[in-house]
Amino acid sequence: MDKKSREYEVCPCRHVSRGQIEDFIRETKTTDLKEICEKLNVGNKCGGCRETILQIVDEIMA
Ligand code: FES
């Protein structure tokens, strides 16, 4: 699946999609990775998706 798709599962550990992360950042204006991970319950298992979450933050805030 296209990694830019809203359905793309950014975090397979927590089953969180790109769209869910994008909406959370837009709605809450949260750009802090730690806060996103805590509040959305994402990126807090293996941590492998954190780099991608940071990229999504950058894209949305750009
Ligand atoms: S892929 Fe997100 S915590 Fe493992």
Image (cartoon, helix red, strand yellow):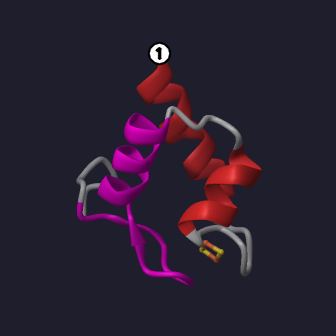
Q: Amino acid at mark 1?
A: Ala
Residue 26 screen position, x and y as percent: 39, 35
Q: Nearer the viewer, residue 61 or 11?
A: 61
Mark count: 1
Q: Nearer the viewer, residue 22 or 52?
A: 22
Q: Determine which quarter of the picture holds residue 55.
A: top right
Q: Quadrant of the N terminus?
A: bottom left
Q: Per the image, is 9 magenta?
A: yes
Q: Determine which quarter of the picture holds residue 20.
A: bottom left
Q: Is residue 1 left or right of residue 39?
A: left
Looking at the rendering, the quadrant in which ligand 1 lies is: bottom right
Q: Nearer the viewer, residue 40 or 59?
A: 40
Q: Is residue 8 above or below residue 60?
A: below
Residue 56 screen position, x and y as percent: 48, 40
- Magenta-colored span: 7-28
Residue that numbered label 1 is attached to: 62
For ligand 1, tell me if the residue under mark 1 lies within 8 Å: no
Residue 22 screen position, x and y as percent: 38, 45
Q: Per the image, is 35 magenta?
A: no
Residue 8 screen position, x and y as percent: 31, 64
Q: Is residue 18 left or right of residue 7?
A: right
Q: Is residue 62 above or below residue 48?
A: above
